[in-house]
Amino acid sequence: MSSFESYGISDLFTMEGSTANLYSQGGKSGGGEAILEQGQTNIRRVGRSNATRNHADLFPNIDIPRALQKDISVNCTLDRKMSTKEAGVRVTEILNKCGMTNEGSEYSYAFIKSMLICMASNSSSNLVPGRAKFYVGESEFDFFADVIGVLRRDARRFFRAYADVTRDYLKDLEREANAGPRSEDEADLKRYNDAVQMWDNIIEVAEGRGLQRVPYLVHDSAESCTGKTAVETLYLANCKSTIFANDAYLGNLVDNPVVSNTKGSSRMGGPVVSSAGHGASSMPEGF
């Protein structure tokens, strides 16, 4: 084992300032001068002792060597994105409101799929209460009243948790629309026509946002998709116009902290102005 490998994490806290540079090499060619690893900062002059930074003061009254003997797992969540567990709780609230929990799993699954495609289809327009609808079989649901009304200020965080799922649904929708009807059966023809109509809506949104090459990323949560290529990331970087950035969501407390939580109360900082030059639109309290 080399002298460098013999040092552990705890050595960062126990090394004295006089500790010799671990990269120092003697011999005729080295002359005792330090050979620095790229990216490392040499605190002292080359050829002299390179003191190791002491982090012990950042952990007052903590026995670091003892603490490092047991590896305690840690984790954290994001303000801008729900955890999958929290999103599962919230989607259950939506399903309960819409009476879907009494139906079979296939209907609940179809409900979530239809809801996410509806969200993606409306990702370039102002969300107007009562306008956007989605369907499961013959049942109709209102996107604003049945979904946003439940999620309220957590809507953005919720849909970001479903970003990968939404992308997969849109890719499946594209394949279904391009594959043609499964048969000449009336039900299969209706399913195919519905898929073509929904995909046409997605393409229209993609064209309006400059995402024709990546239409499966038209949804407002697409930036939270995992495994994006550099090209996909570039397209999204050039497209920042979303329903969640306009009038309907200016009051979102998660992503717009200048808006107060209490309706009618004072704001921190200057007034929030929409892209159209007007103040925040009238929305249910909490958005």
Image: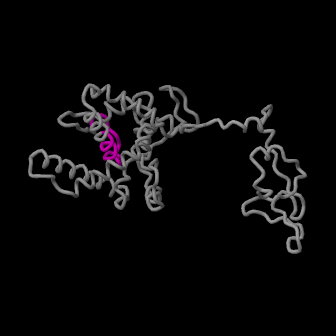
Q: Position of residue 54 (x, y in %)?
A: 82, 45
Depth check, front residue: 199 or 63 = 63
Residue 101 vs residue 138, the one in the foreground? 101
- Of residues 133 and 258, the one nearer the viewer is 133
Residue 137 falls left or right of residue 235: left
| Observer-nearest of 214 and 267 | 214
Question: Residue most toward the bottom?
Answer: 29
- Quick check: 65 left or right of 276? right
Residue 7 falls within the magenta-colored stretch: no
Horizontal and vertical percent position of residue 126: 35, 43
Which quadrant holds the N terminus? Answer: bottom right
Q: Position of residue 87 (x, y in %)?
A: 43, 34
Count the numbered circles shown: 0
The percent position of residue 186, horizontal first and vertical second, equals 9, 46
Q: Is residue 128 magenta?
A: yes
Q: Residue at x 26, y 25 (%)?
A: 102
Please state the extent of the stretch shown in magenta in the rendering: 115-131
The picture quadrant where one finds residue 165 is: top left
49 lies above or below 156: below
Quadrant in the rendering for residue 232 = bottom left
Residue extending farthest to the front is 1
Query: What's the coloring here?
Result: one colour
Corner quadrant of residue 274: top left
Q: Quadrant of the C terminus?
A: top left
Is the residue 170 above or below the residue 152 in the image?
below
Rendered position, 240 above or below 45: above
Q: Residue at x 34, y 33 (%)?
A: 147
* 89 shown above or below 38: above
Residue drawn where x is 75% and y is 55% of the image: 5
